[in-house]
Amino acid sequence: MRIDIITIFPDYFAPLELSLIGRARASGLLDIRLHDLRSWTHDRHNTVDDTPYGGGPGMVMKPEPWGEALDTVTAGADAVPRLVLPTPSGVPFTQQRADRLAGEPWLVFACGRYEGIDSRVAADAAQRMPVEELSIGDYVLAGGESATLVMVETITRLLPGVLGNAESAVQDSFASGSMARLVEGPVYTKPPVWRGLEVPPVLLSGNHGAVDRWRRDQALRRTARNRPDLLRDTPDGEFDRRDREVLTEVRGQSGTEPVAD
Ligand code: JEE
């Protein structure tokens, strides 16, 4: 997969040289190219922003450098890339969307700053390529760079050969299909006792049926506590009798796990 990233902060993407992504790049599996938007400015101050039409706070990114950047980056290839525009007003970036984007041969990420990019940039690009305005969550970042890092990491770990353990990514997407979506329960490794805390004995029992049931109980409890929205979206038919016992029990308790907000 080829990924182009256009930004005024190319150094922000140093982490893409590390770990799984760094190795995938070195092996030629991933072709990630960084571009400094300011190299498509022509004034002595390399200006990329201007005041917003209609008034209001902050500055907006000028369209001209973006137009030239996208023309140059997408030129000279037979293929047409998909343009991803991270924005707080975008469609939610989800695992399902990551799965689809992982099937694309070429993605271009346009990282805005200030209050965002002049809207005509997306409108103009859309005449030549598919454009997706995406948001990584309901909070306001200072720019699109960290959102791009999140999306690139989420997408590239799905590529065959990028993850060390080829099974993990497949398992994730299998689990997020149409079946009941639960968050994972706790995980443990050696030693069996650490600072007086024991690994739950069932995990050492060798009884795979009991392990599976215990893990599901834990996943149900944690989902009910941390993500009740996921359970409300799950049809009743997805729960067996034991599931319903666990949910009834946990719903009658008060917070034993830390809860946000
Ligand atoms: C790209 C600039 C900063 C700050 C105006 C008006 C918006 C943009 N999930 C996500 N959160 N934030 C981003 C994101 C933020 C960006 C850019 C992505 C480019 N910024 C910025 C303020 C505003 N605000 C009131 O409503 C909120 C716009 C993002 C993603 N992906």
Image: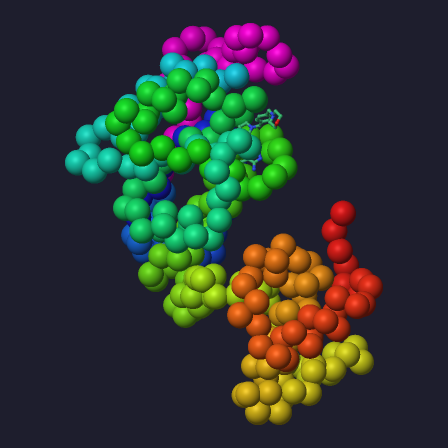
Q: Residue at x 57, y 91 (%)?
A: 207
From this view, report whether residue 202 is shown above or below residue 150: below
The image shows residue 199 at horizontal and vertical percentages of 70, 81
- Could you tell me if residue 136 is visible in this image? yes
The image shows residue 68 at horizontal and vertical percentages of 33, 19
Region of the chain picked out in magenta, as a range: 33-59
- Could you tell me if residue 188 is visible in this image? no
Q: Residue at x 59, y 81 (%)?
A: 213
Q: Main secondary structure of the magenta part?
A: loop
From the viewer's side, name the closer residue of 89 and 16: 89
Q: Residue furthest bottom?
A: 206
From this view, report whether residue 47 is shown above or below residue 22: above
Residue 193 on the magenta span = no
| Quadrant in the rendering for residue 133 | top left
Q: Residue furthest front?
A: 236
Image position of 225 (left or right of 113): right
The image shows residue 195 at horizontal and vertical percentages of 79, 77
Q: How many marks?
A: 0
From the viewer's side, name the closer residue of 225 and 52: 225
Residue 34 on the magenta span = yes
From the viewer's side, name the closer residue of 215 and 22: 215
Q: Residue at x 42, y 48 (%)?
A: 97
Q: Residue furthest right?
A: 254
Q: Residue at x 46, y 18 (%)?
A: 118
Question: Ligand 1 shows up in which quadrant of the image?
Answer: top right
